[in-house]
Image (spheres, helix red, strand yellow):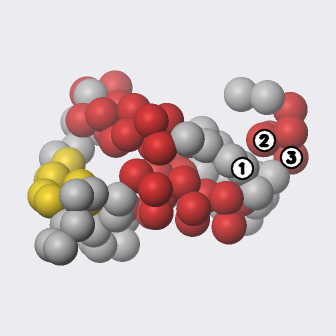
Amino acid sequence: MNAQAELNFDLAEPDVRTLVDMVRTLLGDGGWWTPFELCDEIWRTRGIRISDSSSSARLRDLRKEQYGGHTILIRKRQGSRAFEYRMER
């Protein structure tokens, strides 16, 4: 992670230090998110620009045992070509 990204972390949220933590936190609301929406929210709240492919990779990471082995649901957004994701609790 670059030094600029580290400067944007909120010290009130010590458990949110990496991109995978940020994506996990956003998915924790139980809602459906597209990779673009994840990128947009990270930019809006953290000032960190990431690509759609980076957020998609972090979604895949969350499925791995070392990142919690979460179940990530996927569906096609109604009326769109986009896919959206939700973390099962």
Residue on which the image places disc 1: 48
Q: Residue at x 40, y 52 (%)?
A: 35
Q: Residue drawn at (54%, 54%), measured in percent from left and top?
A: 39
State the CA–CA distance, disc 2 to disc 1: 6 Å
Q: Are marks 2 and 1 in contact (CB under 8 Å)?
A: yes
Seen from the viewer's position, the closer of residues 64 and 15 is: 64
Indicate which label's residue lies in the foreground, 1 or 3: 1
Name the secondary structure under disc 2: helix
Question: Residue 83's quadrant in the figure?
Answer: bottom left
Whether residue 71 is visible here, answered yes or no, is: yes
- Quickly name the residue at label 3: 7
Q: Badge 2: how crowded within 10 Å, few (<14), some, or many (20+)?
A: some
Q: Earlier in the sequence, mark 2 or mark 1?
A: 2
In percent of width and height, residue 31 lies at 29, 73
Label 3 element class: helix
- In the rendered structure, find residue 76 and report the number of the disc placed on it: none
* Label 3 Cα neighbours within 10 Å, binned few <14 / some 14-19 / many ≥20: few
Residue drawn at x 57%, y 62% is 40
Q: Position of residue 26 (x, y in %)?
A: 45, 63
Circles 1, 3 touching at the beta carbon (< 8 Å): no
Three-letter code, disc 2: Ala
Q: Which type of secondary structure does the marked residue at label 1 adopt?
A: loop
Q: Amino acid at mark 1?
A: Ile
In the picture, measured across the screen, residue 32 lies left or right of residue 78, that is right
Q: Is residue 62 above or below residue 26?
A: above
Q: Which residue is mark 2?
A: 5
Structural distance between the alpha carbons of marks 1 and 3: 10 Å
Q: Are marks 3 and 2 in contact (CB under 8 Å)?
A: yes
Residue 2 found in image quarter: top right
Q: At label 3, which amino acid type do we have?
A: Leu
Crowding near the residue tagged with mark 1, few <14, some 14–19, many ≥20 C-alpha atoms within 10 Å: some
Report the side of 78 relative to 45 (left or right). left
